[in-house]
Image (spheres, rainbow, N blue to C red):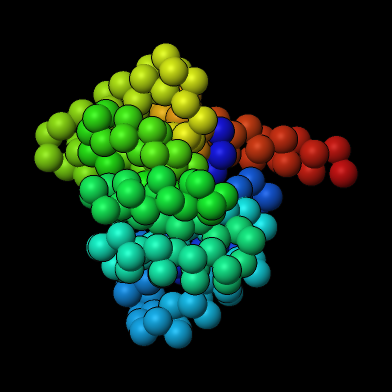
Amino acid sequence: MKFFIDTANLAQIKEAQDLGILDGVTTNPSLMAKEGITGKENIIKHYLAICNIVDGPVSAEVIATDFAGMVKEGEELAKLHKNIVVKVPMIKEGIKAISYFSKKGIKTNCTLVFSAGQALLAAKAGATYVSPFLGRLDDISSDGMRLIEDIRVIYDNYMYETQILAASIRHTMHILKCAEIGADVMTGPLSSINGLFNHPLTDSGLKQFLADYQKGN
Ligand code: G3P
């Protein structure tokens, strides 16, 4: 399972990268705004800064919602760095754009996916990644994990190469359940990754080992 971090915070990206287990980064306009990164020029500089920290796929989202606008923006983004993946919303124009990018060999991440039908369309259009937002489904009392399961079955039935990028991950159990189902990638906040480290028996066991070592020295 690949681990992406879902943030535009450079310190957190660096911290995850330093762990040696980070495979990529996802961002979105809200995450950029949260870091105070505004304006096209600053946003582009920020993508490049991220690409300089992590040698793996970095999702950069288009703002346009029409086909021509998405193609223009996506082609500009793709030219920035070899690791940029163009993130495109799940709307009709977005699917057209993903199909266009796919034929041009530009990698894409179809975002804001909330149903298996949408995921099927993304795969048919040739998206590199599909991003089902499981946490946001859970937020409205819908079963986000069930969506990941359904997409896995559908993609396996037809051997679609689109990778399931479980997004809107909120905590460690989301990561573990996605791993059980076989999501190809998870993208979550640093806290969800750090949560995987924790176990009280690890802490008490290490404490005991160190105390016993001291007794003999
Ligand atoms: O990758 C999608 C993600 O940014 C959405 O997460 O926590 O805002 O639902 P969240």
Above or below, comparing residue 9 to residue 157 in the picture:
below
Q: To which quarter of the image does residue 140 belong?
A: top left
Q: Quadrant of the N terminus?
A: top right
Residue 136 on image: x %, y %: 22, 44
Q: Is residue 51 left or right of residue 96?
A: right
Q: Nearer the viewer, residue 56 or 169?
A: 56
Residue 87 on image: x %, y %: 40, 56
Above or below, comparing residue 70 to residue 186 in the picture:
below
Q: To which quarter of the image does residue 134 belong?
A: top left
Above or below, comparing residue 202 to residue 89 in the picture:
above
Residue drawn at 32 percent across, 30 percent down: 120
Residue drawn at 26 percent across, 53 percent down: 93
Residue drawn at 67 percent across, 57 percent down: 55
Residue drawn at 54 percent across, 64 percent down: 78
Q: Is residue 68 left or right of residue 175?
A: left
Q: Nearer the viewer, residue 74 or 206?
A: 74
Residue 25 on image: x %, y %: 51, 56
In this rendering, does residue 200 appear at all?
Answer: no
Q: To which quarter of the image does residue 155 belong?
A: top left
Q: Is residue 113 left or right of residue 73?
A: left
Q: Quadrant of the C terminus?
A: top right
In this rendering, does residue 8 appear at all?
Answer: yes
Residue 191 on image: x %, y %: 43, 52
**Outermost residue toward the top?**
157
Q: Nearer the viewer, residue 168 or 64?
A: 64
